[in-house]
Amino acid sequence: VGGYIVGGDLTSAKAAFTPPFKSRSNILLGPRSSVTSRENCLSVQLAEGEARDELNLVDNPELLGRKVYMKGDIVESYYGIPGIKNITDFVIQ
């Protein structure tokens, strides 16, 4: 899956699209870097490990708006919207 990192701090009702971010465990991918609606995004679970260390917006705020490609399990719902879990590989553009 490919997309732009547009936000984080997901809950079942909202998400943050501007810094500062507080959660290292998830991000949002959008089809464009300008997306600001969680309904137009994919939620991404960042489990402990390399993906969390490299992709979370708390430690890597410069990634906001950057394109990323990732492999993982596509799930029907993660925080109420379609998402990706169990990331096995990723590339930041």
Image (cartoon, rainbow, N blue to C red):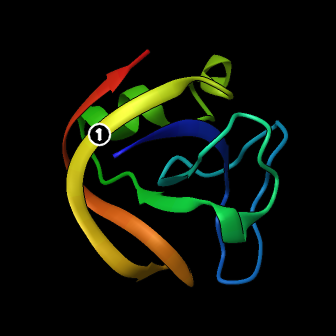
Q: How dense is the environment of label 1, judged by Cα within 10 Å: few (below 14), some, or many (20 and up)?
A: some
Q: Is residue 16 above or below residue 60?
A: below
Residue at the far left in the pictured view: 88
Q: Based on the displayed image, in which of its 4 quarters is residue 10 positioned?
A: bottom right
Name the residue beneath numbered marker 1: 70
Q: Is residue 59 left or right of residue 83?
A: right
Q: Is residue 18 above or below residue 92?
A: below
Q: Residue 63 appears at what percent x and percent y?
A: 60, 23
Q: Is residue 35 left or right of residue 62?
A: right
Q: Based on the displayed image, in which of its 4 quarters is residue 73 positioned?
A: bottom left
Query: Residue at the spot x=85%, y=40% of the render?
Result: 18
Give the secondary structure at mark 1.
strand
Q: Residue 12 appears at what percent x and percent y?
A: 65, 83
Q: Residue 27 appears at what percent x and percent y?
A: 55, 50
- Count numbered badges in the picture: 1
Query: Residue at the spot x=37%, y=40% of the render?
Result: 52
Query: Residue at the spot x=35%, y=62% of the render?
Result: 84
Q: Is residue 51 left or right of residue 5?
A: left
The type of residue carrying mark 1 is Met
Query: Residue at the spot x=69%, y=71% of the render?
Result: 39
- Give the quarter of the figure containing the C terminus: top left
Residue at the far front in the pictured view: 31
